């Protein structure tokens, strides 16, 4: 089965399952398809979670099967995540029920004393009642979140993204946020850079009285060093000191001067400049400075827009001996600074991922790892302050215009991709 076909089947089944009325039995066709898909991918978290909920809703309940499924989930998720805590709690509950039932059966077979038999039976009935109440609440919560999620997704997907309609269709629900120009950070001290950052944050929606830049994100900035500039292409025959790479506004300042733009876009590979792509190398759009940012308090959502030319879609570059469209990468530098560490792309249009494995933001929850440090990639003497690392799971290619990436952002690791986001964020690529 092709990967896209399998992924679509899983997504459709998840949607169908979480749209069910929790008061009615789970249809047999859903149970059957869940089992079929798990035969194909036994490590799929969405399918495993669904399997566990199906087992909980089966009469009689097989506690050992439920424990097995959650032990499988526990082996696949980060050990300190909320999902891992939830799995451990459910394992404990169902292990306890199983042990008590075993104890009851032992009492019943080995002792005719009615009083001894009745005590564990009462315990079983009591614990099972508690579990049923918990599970009914859990299922209802999932169902309610799913309904609200669908409404929000529909609202965000109604955003107009055509080049001729550069405003949100419900303009009254969104306010414009100013895009600040990039600036030159080269040879400034870390303290000076922090003061610049604080100034821009103080005018943003993330302003707090005692804001300090996150040391995990910005703490490795080195004093008096140059910064990568907004250079888009490289000269394959260049033999100088690479001072051109540090001239003008600094690339990182596009993000740091615009804290509300939590997730932005950059080119992870420096492209060779030739006559073939001169349009790109000399253009403003190749600097990937957004032209629009809007925020809706009603939808708890940001919409960030870039412009690309149709020529951009035709450019190709060689990476690891293969030819690709120019790859782009999401950077969560600002998101991570404000604690939004986790991202999932719940919807994309005209986007193809560039991951070297099956783990990327369209099928998994990805952790932002962006931070600023001194590196040698600029090749200028003693290095430059720049962003690292490259993250395969956040790389993608634009295949047609307009294109969109719709993201969920969370501060804590979510229990599933279906969990309501702490913040919604949409990136739009319009045709210039």
Image: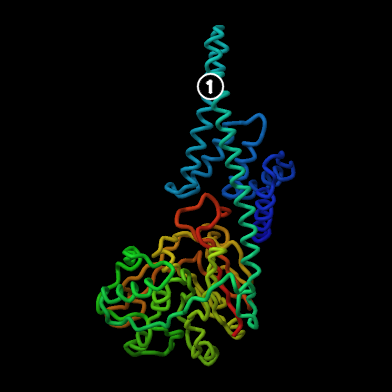
Residue 396, position in %: x, y?
55, 70
Along the line of sight, which residue is nearer the eye, 23 or 66? 23
Say which residue appears at 67% left-offset and 53% top-offset: 15
Q: How is the image coloured?
A: rainbow
The residue that mark 1 highlights is 123
Q: Quadrant of residue 326?
A: bottom right
Residue 274, position in %: x, y?
50, 90
Instruction: Give the total number of marks visible in the rendering.
Output: 1
In the image: residue 136, left or right of residue 366: right
Q: Quadrant of residue 350?
A: bottom right
Along the line of sight, which residue is nearer the eye, 253 or 8? 253
Quarter of the image where the C terminus is located: bottom right
In the image: residue 316, left or right of residue 287: right
Q: Quadrant of residue 315?
A: bottom right
Residue that protrudes farthest toward the bottom in the picture: 275
In the image: residue 252, left or right of residue 432: left
Residue that protrudes farthest toward the top in the picture: 112
| Residue at disc 1, secondary structure | helix
Q: Badge 1, how many Cα within 10 Å: few under 14, some, many 20+?
A: some
Residue 317, position in %: x, y?
53, 80
Say which residue appears at 43% left-offset and 86% top-offset: 234
In the image: residue 384, left or right of residue 401: left
Along the line of sight, which residue is nearer the eye, 271 or 186? 186
Residue 266, position in %: x, y?
47, 76
Above or below 299: residue 280 = below
């Amino acid at each position: 089965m092709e990967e896209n076909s399998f992924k679509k089947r899983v997504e459709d089944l998840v949607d169908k399952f979480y749209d069910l009325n929790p008061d009615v039995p789970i249809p047999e066709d859903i149970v059957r398809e869940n089992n079929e898909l798990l035969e194909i991918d036994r490590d799929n978290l969405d399918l495993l979670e669904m399997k566990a909920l199906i087992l909980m809703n089966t009469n009689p309940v097989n506690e050992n099967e439920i424990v097995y499924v959650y032990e499988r989930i526990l082996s696949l998720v980060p050990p300190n995540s909320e999902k891992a805590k939830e799995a451990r709690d459910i394992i404990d509950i169902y292990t306890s029920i199983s042990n008590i039932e075993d104890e009851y059966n032992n009492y019943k077979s080995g002792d005719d004393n009615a009083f001894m038999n009745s005590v564990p039976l009462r315990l079983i009935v009591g614990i099972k009642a508690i579990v049923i109440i918990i599970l009914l609440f859990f299922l209802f919560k999932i169902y309610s979140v799913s309904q609200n999620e669908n409404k929000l997704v529909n609202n965000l997907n109604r955003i107009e993204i055509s080049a001729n309609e550069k405003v949100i269709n419900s303009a009254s629900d969104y306010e414009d946020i100013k895009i600040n120009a990039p600036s030159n950070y080269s040879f400034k001290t870390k303290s000076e850079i922090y003061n610049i950052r604080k100034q821009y944050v103080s005018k943003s929606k993330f302003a707090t009285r005692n804001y300090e830049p996150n040391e995990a994100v910005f703490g490795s900035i080195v004093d008096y060093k140059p910064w990568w500039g907004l250079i888009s292409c490289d000269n394959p025959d260049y033999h100088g000191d690479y001072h051109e790479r540090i001239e003008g506004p600094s690339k990182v300042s596009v993000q740091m001067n615009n804290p509300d733009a939590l997730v932005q876009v950059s080119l992870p590979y420096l492209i060779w400049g030739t006559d073939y792509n001169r349009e790109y190398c000399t253009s403003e759009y190749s600097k990937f400075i957004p032209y629009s940012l809007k925020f809706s308090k009603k939808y708890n959502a940001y919409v960030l827009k870039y412009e690309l030319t149709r020529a951009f879609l035709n450019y190709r570059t060689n990476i690891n001996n293969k030819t690709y469209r120019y790859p782009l990468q999401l950077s969560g530098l600002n998101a991570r600074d404000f604690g939004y560490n986790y991202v999932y792309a719940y919807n994309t249009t005209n986007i193809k991922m560039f991951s070297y494995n099956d783990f990327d933001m369209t099928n998994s929850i990805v952790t932002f790892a962006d931070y600023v440090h001194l590196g040698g990639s600029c090749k200028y003497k003693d290095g430059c302050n720049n962003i690292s690392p490259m993250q395969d799971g956040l790389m993608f290619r634009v295949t047609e215009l307009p294109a969109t990436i719709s993201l969920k952002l969370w501060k804590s690791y979510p229990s599933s991709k279906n969990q309501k986001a702490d913040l919604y964020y949409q990136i739009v690529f319009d045709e210039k």
